[in-house]
C-alpha cells in the first residue's frame, strides 16, 4: 500500500505522519503541495502544522494548492483521506467536511494527552476500533474548536458521522465535544488530535494512534479485491 | 530634516557616558541634504560634528575610529561602529573574564566548533554531531513580551541553523518578578505565548526550561532561549566569506525598519518616560518565514551550495557583513540598493542597522548562484545577490568592506576593525559592601516546623509556592511532540531526544540557574547551577559532555556587579574544568538593572548529555507498582543547608547565609552511578534533588503517575525537617524494583555514593512519612496544580461553558480534573489576572500562594530612571 503525505510550506508533522504510515506497514510517499500528481497513492494524509503560516485563516490558502485539487477529486471518488489538525482545517476549508475549526475558547495553544471516545468504526480510518473504545492521543492546537450550525451538528450525529469525541475534559471548547468527523461516504476523516504522535511506546502516551493507520490498510485491502495487489509496489 | 542633532543641547542634558533618551531614527536617518553621507564627503568635511555620544560611543572610542579611517566616519560607518563596538557585539566588559573558558576548559575530542562560532558543535557518533546554545532576549521581552520572546526563539534557532544543523528542539529558562505582581501578569502570559507561538509554528518541540519568580526580576524579566540542532559531521558550516569573487547572497525576509538600533540605541540609551517610542526597536517575528528559511538552508547545505553562512541577528547586515569578511581576512563589495526592502524610503544607514528577523547571509560560488536562487524560489523566500568577496589590499593588508548605495560609496572600512578590534575594558571590580552582612544572616537559625502536622503543612505550602508549583499552565502552551523524537520533556529533569531512530542514539539537555545562591556567593552559585544541570542530565542516565551558558547580570559599570560577574565566570570555568565538560558557547547579558538595583547575578547553565540508546532513559515519576512496590533510596549526603533555600524564601521571605557546598567529584560519581544503573536497568525512576529538597522530589515523583510512597527517613540524628527541606547538592531520589536492590546498593558502594534506603512506592495514592504525617496525593495535587491557573487565568472549570449553549448544563467534568484550566477568559482582552483574581480554587487556603514575602519593594526604583540594556550574541 502506498499512502501519500502532503507537505505544504509550513507543514510540521509531515515526517511524523510518514513515520506512522511506515510503522503501520505501508509505504509513505511524500507529496509536494505544488504538484498535482498524486503518484498513484492509495490514500492521503494531510498532516498537522501551520500551512502558509496560517496567518489568514487556518487552511484557507492550502485548499487552493495544486495537490489539494487532485486530492479533492480523488476523495470524491472514494480515496481515503485523513486530515490531522491543520489537515482537518484544510478539509473543512475545501468543503470536503462540514463545519470549521476556530480559536480555542480559552485562547491558548494547548498540548496535552487527551482521552477520546471512538464513536464510529464505519470509516476508512477507524475500522479497527470498537465503538465506544476510549483511546489516549495527544492534542495540540491553537485553533481546534469545532463549530457548525445546529442543523449540521444534528445531521452529523444522526448520520453517525461524529468519529470521536473528547472525554474527561474538552481541550478547546469544540461543540458537542467533537474531536473528529467524517463525510457521508466515510472515506474522508478530519481529526484534531494527533494519532501520529501515539504510535511508539518510546515517544507517545500510548499506541492508540496506530489504529487509524492500520484501519486504512484494511479498508484498502478490502477495496482491492481481497488484497491481491496489496504490498505489490514499493 | 536637519543634518545635525543639536549637540549643544544634548551634551548639556546627558551625563557623561549616559545619553538621554532620543528617538533612534532621528540620528540614524539624518544624512546631509540631497543624498547620503558618503566617504568622499567625509573626507572633505572632517570637522563636521557627529552624534557619536548619542549612539553610545565614548569620546576616546570615536577618536579611535577617526584614527583607523584617517578621516571622520560617514553616518553609516558611525552607526556600524556604534553597533559593533557596543557591549552586545564586542563583549568589551566581559572579554577579559570569558577568556577563562578557553584557558581552563579541558580539550575534548568531541568538540568540532566552540566559542566564537555561532554555536558550539559536539560530535556524538562517527557521523553525527549536535550543536546547542542558550542566549538571552531579556530586554525586548520586557518592552514587548510576545514579540520579544518570539524573536528570542527565532534568533537562537538561526544560530543553530548557521552551523549546518537542523534545529530539533528548544528550551526556555524564564524568570519573572513576584508571581502576584500585576506586571508579572502582563509579562508572563505574553512571553509564554511568544515562546510557544514561534516555536510551535516552527515545528520545534519545547522540551524543558525553567519558570522562576523572584522580586529581583521585577523590572528585568529574564527570557533565555536554548536551541539544539543535529547535523552530519561533514555538513558543518563556517562563517568565513572565503573565495575572492564569490557572491554574497541575502536570503529570507525583506529588510524593514523594525529593530533599527536595537543593539546600540535601545540597548544603551537610558529609558525614560518616552520609552514608548522605543517600541519600533523591538523586532517582529514571522515564524513561517523562518520555517521556510530553515528548509531552504538545509536543502542548500545538502546540495553543497554554501561556501559560508552567517545568520542576521542583533546587529543585522552590519554584523553579518563585517564578521564574515573579517573571519576570512577578505574584503567585500556590497551594493545596498539591491537589498529587498519593505519600505523603499529606507536610508543606507537604516538598511545596515535594521534588525529585521528571518534573514541569513550566504557566500556562494558564482557557478552555484543560479541553483541557490532556484532553491530559494522553491521555498518561496527572497534571495538576492547583494555583493561579492574581494581580495586583500595591496601589500597583503586585509581587504576592505566597501558598501555603496546608488553609486554613492557610504562605507569603506577594514572589516576586522568592526568585528575584532573593538575596545576591551578591564572594569573595576569590588565585592558588594553588603555581602558580609548578608552571608552572616543564615537561614539555618530560622524557626522550623517540628511536629508532624507542621511538617505536613509545610510540604503542602511548599508544593503550592509559585516556584515549585505545577508549571503545566505554561508547558501546555508548547508543542512537545512535533518531530516525533521527544523521549522526555518537561516536567522531567532533562529533555531527552532521539537522534537516530535505528540505533536509539540520543541526547539529554537540562538548563538550570539559581539567582539566590549566586547572590549569596556568585562563585559557588555558578558551580551550583552547573552541578544541578549536570545532575539533571546524569539522573536520566545520559553522559554529560558539554556546557552552554547565559550570564545574566546588572550593569558592568557597577564594580559590585562586575565582581559578581568575575566570580561567576571563574566558578563556572573552574567547575567545567573539573567536570571535563567544555563551555562550547553562550551569551552575556548585562544591564539587567532598575535604577541602582541590579538583579541577582543569574548564571544559567545548560548541560548536554549523550545516550547510546534513549530506550534506557530513566524518568522521574514512580511507576505503578505491580507487586510490593519499588524500593526508594536517597543518594548523596544531606547536611543542614537551608540558606538560600526555597523553604527559607517561602516560609520566611529570607535570603541570607551561604549557599550549599558543591563537591563536583561527588556529582561525577553520582552521574557515573546513574549511567551504570541505567545501562543495567536497575532503576525505574530517578529524580534530582534541588529546589525544595527531598520533600518536593517526593511530591513530584509521586504525582507524575499518581503513585504513592511510604517513606521512613534515616534515624541518624538529622531531623526529619532537614531531610525533607535541606537543599544539599549532589543528591537524587531513585526507585529500584525489588530484585535489583542488592545490585544497586553494591553499585552505589562501588562508586562511593552514599545510599540510604528511605521507603517504598505503594499503590495507594498517599504520601506517608513514618511517624510524621500522611497526605493523600489528591490533596497535594490540588495544592500543587492550582497556583499558576489562579494567578494567570484558568482557575475556574468550564462548568458553565459560557458562550456554548450546547453545554450550558453539562455536569460531567468534575472540578479539578483538568487542572481547572477550561476557563473562558472573558475574551482574554485584559490581563488574565483580572478574571482569575476573584476565583477561589477549591480547598486551597489563599495564604499558601500569597505569603511569599517581598523583601525588596517591587516598586522601588521604578520612579528612578529605568536602565536596561540587552546583549545577546556570541561569546568571544
Image: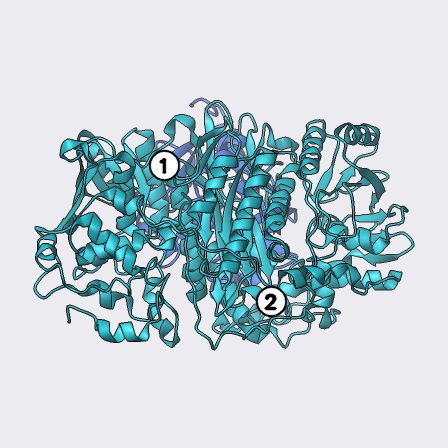
Chain colours: A blue, B cyan
In front: B493, or B834?
Answer: B493
Residue B119: mark in rendering? none
Residue B589: image location, x then y, percent: 45, 54
For label 2, the crowd category at 10 Å Cα-Cα, with few meaning under 14, some 14 to 19 and many 20 or more, is: many
Residue B789, quarter of the rendered image: bottom right
Residue shown at the point (73%, 43%) measured from the top left: B731
Q: Residue tagged by mark 2?
A: B179
Q: Is residue B181 above or below residue B710?
A: below
Residue B637: image location, x then y, percent: 78, 43
- Read off the chain for label 1: A
Can marks 2 and 1 be said to lie on one chain?
no
Side (left or right) of B248 relative to B442 = left
- Read off the chain for label 2: B
Residue B823, quarter of the rendered image: bottom right
Q: Secondary structure at mark 2?
A: loop
Assess whether mark 1 and mark 2 are in contact (beta carbons under 8 angstroms).
no
Q: Residue tagged by mark 1?
A: A31
In front: B126, or B581?
Answer: B581
In front: B406, or A165?
Answer: B406
Assign the C terminus of chain B to one quadrant of the image: top left
Q: Is residue A89 above or below residue B363?
A: below
For label 1, the crowd category at 10 Å Cα-Cα, with few meaning under 14, some 14 to 19 and many 20 or more, is: many
Q: Secondary structure at mark 1?
A: strand
- The residues bearing labels 2 and 1 have C-alpha atoms spaced at a distance of 48 Å
Assign the N terminus of chain B to one quadrant of the image: bottom left
Q: Is residue B550 in view from this perspective?
A: yes
Side (left or right) of B95 relative to B660 = left
Residue B581: image location, x then y, percent: 56, 35
Residue B441: image location, x then y, percent: 71, 63
Residue shown at the point (45%, 48%) measured from the top left: B587
Q: Is residue A94 in view from this perspective?
A: no
Amino acid at each position: 500500500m502506498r499512502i501519500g503525505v502532503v507537505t505544504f510550506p509550513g507543514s510540521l508533522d509531515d515526517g511524523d505522519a510518514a513515520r506512522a504510515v511506515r510503522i503501520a506497514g505501508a509505504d509513505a510517499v511524500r507529496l509536494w503541495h505544488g504538484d498535482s500528481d498524486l503518484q498513484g497513492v492509495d490514500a492521503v494524509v494531510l498532516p498537522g502544522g501551520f500551512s502558509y503560516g496560517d496567518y489568514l485563516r487556518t487552511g484557507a490558502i492550502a485548499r487552493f494548492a495544486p495537490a489539494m485539487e487532485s486530492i479533492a477529486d480523488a476523495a470524491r471518488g472514494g480515496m481515503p483521506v485523513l486530515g490531522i489538525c491543520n489537515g482537518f482545517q484544510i478539509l473543512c476549508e475545501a468543503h470536503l467536511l462540514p463545519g470549521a475549526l476556530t480559536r480555542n475558547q480559552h485562547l491558548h495553544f494547548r498540548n496535552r494527552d487527551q482521552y477520546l471516545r471512538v464513536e464510529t468504526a464505519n470509516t476508512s480510518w477507524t475500522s479497527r476500533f470498537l465503538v465506544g473504545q476510549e483511546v489516549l492521543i495527544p492534542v495540540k492546537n491553537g485553533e481546534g474548536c469545532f463549530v457548525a450550525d445546529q442543523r449540521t451538528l444534528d445531521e452529523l450525529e444522526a448520520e453517525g458521522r461524529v468519529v470521536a469525541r473528547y472525554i474527561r475534559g474538552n481541550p478547546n471548547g469544540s461543540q458537542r465535544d467533537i474531536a473528529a468527523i467524517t463525510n457521508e461516504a466515510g472515506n474522508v476523516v478530519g481529526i484534531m488530535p494527533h494519532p501520529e504522535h501515539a504510535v511508539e511506546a518510546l515517544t507517545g502516551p500510548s499506541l492508540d494512534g496506530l489504529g487509524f493507520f492500520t484501519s486504512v490498510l484494511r479498508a484498502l485491502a478490502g477495496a482491492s479485491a481481497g488484497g491481491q495487489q496489496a504490498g505489490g509496489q514499493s | 530634516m536637519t543634518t545635525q542633532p543639536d549637540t549643544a543641547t544634548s551634551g548639556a542634558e546627558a551625563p557623561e557616558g549616559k545619553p538621554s533618551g532620543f528617538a533612534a531614527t532621528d540620528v540614524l536617518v539624518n544624512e546631509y541634504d540631497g543624498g547620503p553621507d558618503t566617504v568622499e564627503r567625509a573626507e572633505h568635511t572632517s570637522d563636521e560634528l557627529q552624534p557619536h555620544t548619542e549612539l553610545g560611543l565614548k569620546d576616546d572610542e570615536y577618536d579611535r575610529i577617526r584614527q583607523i579611517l584617517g578621516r571622520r566616519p560617514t553616518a553609516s560607518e558611525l552607526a556600524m561602529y556604534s553597533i559593533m563596538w557596543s557591549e552586545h557585539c564586542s563583549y568589551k566588559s566581559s572579554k577579559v573574564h570569558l577568556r577563562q573558558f578557553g584557558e581552563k576548559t579541558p580539550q575534548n575530542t568531541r568538540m568540532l566548533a566552540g566559542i566564537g562560532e555561532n554555536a558550539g558543535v559536539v560530535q556524538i557518533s562517527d557521523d553525527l554531531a549536535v550543536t546547542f546554545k542558550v542566549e538571552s532576549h531579556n530586554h525586548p521581552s520586557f518592552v514587548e513580551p510576545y514579540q520579544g520572546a518570539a524573536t528570542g526563539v527565532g534568533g537562537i534557532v538561526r544560530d543553530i541553523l548557521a552551523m549546518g544543523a537542523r534545529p530539533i528542539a528548544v528550551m526556555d529558562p524564564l524568570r519573572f518578578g513576584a508571581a502576584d505582581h500585576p506586571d508579572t501578569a502582563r509579562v508572563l502570559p505574553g512571553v509564554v505565548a511568544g515562546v510557544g507561538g514561534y516555536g510551535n509554528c516552527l515545528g520545534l518541540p519545547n522540551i524543558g526550561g525553567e519558570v522562576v519568580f523572584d522580586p529581583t526580576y521585577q523590572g528585568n524579566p529574564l527570557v533565555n532561549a536554548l536551541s539544539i540542532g543535529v547535523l552530519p559531521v561533514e555538513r558543518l558550516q563556517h562563517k568565513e566569506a572565503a573565495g575572492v569573487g564569490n557572491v554574497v547572497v541575502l536570503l529570507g525576509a525583506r529588510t524593514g525598519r523594525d529593530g533599527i538600533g536595537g543593539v546600540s540605541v535601545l540597548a544603551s540609551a537610558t529609558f525614560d518616560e518616552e520609552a514608548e517610542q522605543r517600541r519600533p526597536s523591538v523586532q517582529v517575528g514571522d515564524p513561517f518565514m523562518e520555517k521556510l528559511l530553515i528548509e531552504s538552508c538545509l536543502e542548500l547545505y545538502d546540495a553543497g551550495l554554501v561556501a559560508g553562512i552567517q545568520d542576521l541577528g542583533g546587529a543585522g547586515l552590519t554584523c553579518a557583513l563585517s564578521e564574515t569578511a573579517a573571519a576570512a581576512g577578505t574584503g567585500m563589495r556590497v551594493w545596498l540598493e539591491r537589498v529587498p526592502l519593505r519600505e523603499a524610503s529606507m536610508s543606507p544607514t537604516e538598511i545596515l542597522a535594521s534588525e529585521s528577523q528571518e534573514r541569513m547571509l550566504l557566500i556562494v560560488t558564482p557557478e552555484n548562484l543560479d541553483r541557490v536562487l532556484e532553491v530559494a524560489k522553491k521555498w518561496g523566500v527572497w534571495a538576492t545577490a547583494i555583493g561579492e568577496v574581494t581580495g586583500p589590499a595591496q601589500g597583503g593588508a586585509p581587504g576592505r568592506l566597501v558598501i555603496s548605495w546608488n553609486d554613492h560609496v557610504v562605507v569603506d572600512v577594514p572589516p576586522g576593525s568592526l568585528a575584532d578590534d573593538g575596545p576591551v575594558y578591564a572594569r573595576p571590580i569590588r565585592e558588594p559592601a553588603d555581602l558580609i552582612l548578608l552571608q552572616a544572616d543564615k537561614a539555618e537559625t530560622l524557626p522550623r516546623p517540628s511536629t508532624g502536622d507542621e511538617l505536613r503543612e509545610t510540604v503542602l505550602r511548599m508544593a503550592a509556592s509559585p516556584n515549585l508549583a505545577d508549571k503545566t499552565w505554561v508547558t501546555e502552551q508548547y508543542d512537545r511532540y512535533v518531530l516525533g523524537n521527544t523521549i522526555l520533556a518537561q516536567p522531567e529533569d532533562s529533555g531527552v531526544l532521539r537522534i537516530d531512530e535505528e540505533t536509539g542514539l540520543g541526547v539529554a539537555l537540562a538548563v538550570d540557574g539559581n539567582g539566590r545562591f549566586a547572590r549569596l556567593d556568585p562563585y559557588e552559585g555558578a558551580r551550583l547551577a552547573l552541578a544541578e544541570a549536570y545532575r539533571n542530565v546524569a539522573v536520566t542516565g545520559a553522559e554529560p559532555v558539554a556546557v552552554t551558558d547565559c550570564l545574566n547580570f546588572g550593569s558592568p559599570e557597577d564594580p559590585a556587579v562586575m565582581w559578581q560577574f568575575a566570580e561567576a565566570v571563574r566558578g563556572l570555568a573552574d567547575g567545567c574544568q573539573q567536570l571535563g565538560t567544555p563551555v562550547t558557547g553562550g551569551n552575556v547579558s548585562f544591564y539587567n538593572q532598575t535604577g541602582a538595583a541590579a538583579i541577582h547575578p543569574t548564571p544559567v547553565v545548560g548541560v548536554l548529555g549523550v545516550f547510546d540508546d534513549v530506550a534506557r532513559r530513566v524518568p522521574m515519576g514512580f511507576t505503578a507498582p505491580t507487586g510490593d512496590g519499588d524500593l526508594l533510596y536517597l543518594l548523596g549526603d544531606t547536611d543542614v543547608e537551608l540558606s538560600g533555600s526555597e523553604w527559607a524564601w517561602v516560609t520566611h521571605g529570607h535570603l541570607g547565609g551561604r549557599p550549599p557546598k558543591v563537591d563536583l567529584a561527588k556529582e561525577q560519581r553520582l552521574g557515573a552511578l546513574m549511567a551504570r544503573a541505567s545501562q543495567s536497568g536497575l532503576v525505574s525512576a530517578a529524580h534530582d534533588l534541588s529546589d525544595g529538597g527531598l520533600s518536593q522530589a517526593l511530591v513530584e515523583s509521586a504525582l507524575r503517575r499518581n503513585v504513592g510512597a511510604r517513606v521512613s527517613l534515616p534515624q541518624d540524628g538529622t531531623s526529619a525537617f532537614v531531610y525533607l527541606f535541606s537543599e544539599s547538592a549532589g543528591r537524587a531520589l531513585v526507585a529500584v524494583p525489588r530484585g535489583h536492590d542488592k545490585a544497586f546498593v553494591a553499585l552505589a558502594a562501588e562508586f562511593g555514593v552514599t545510599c540510604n534506603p528511605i521507603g517504598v512506592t505503594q499503590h495507594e495514592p498517599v504520601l506517608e512519612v513514618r511517624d510524621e504525617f500522611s497526605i493523600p496525593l489528591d490533596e497535594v495535587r490540588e495544592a500543587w496544580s492550582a497556583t499558576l491557573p489562579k494567578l494567570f487565568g484558568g482557575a475556574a472549570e468550564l462548568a458553565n461553558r459560557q458562550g456554548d449553549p450546547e453545554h450550558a448544563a453539562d455536569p460531567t467534568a468534575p472540578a479539578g480534573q483538568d487542572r481547572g484550566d477550561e476557563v473562558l477568559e472573558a475574551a482574554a482582552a485584559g490581563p488574565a489576572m483580572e478574571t482569575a483574581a476573584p476565583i477561589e480554587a477549591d480547598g486551597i487556603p489563599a495564604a499558601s500562594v500569597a505569603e511569599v514575602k517581598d523583601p525588596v519593594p517591587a516598586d522601588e526604583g521604578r520612579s528612578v530612571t529605568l536602565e536596561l540594556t540587552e546583549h545577546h550574541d556570541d561569546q568571544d
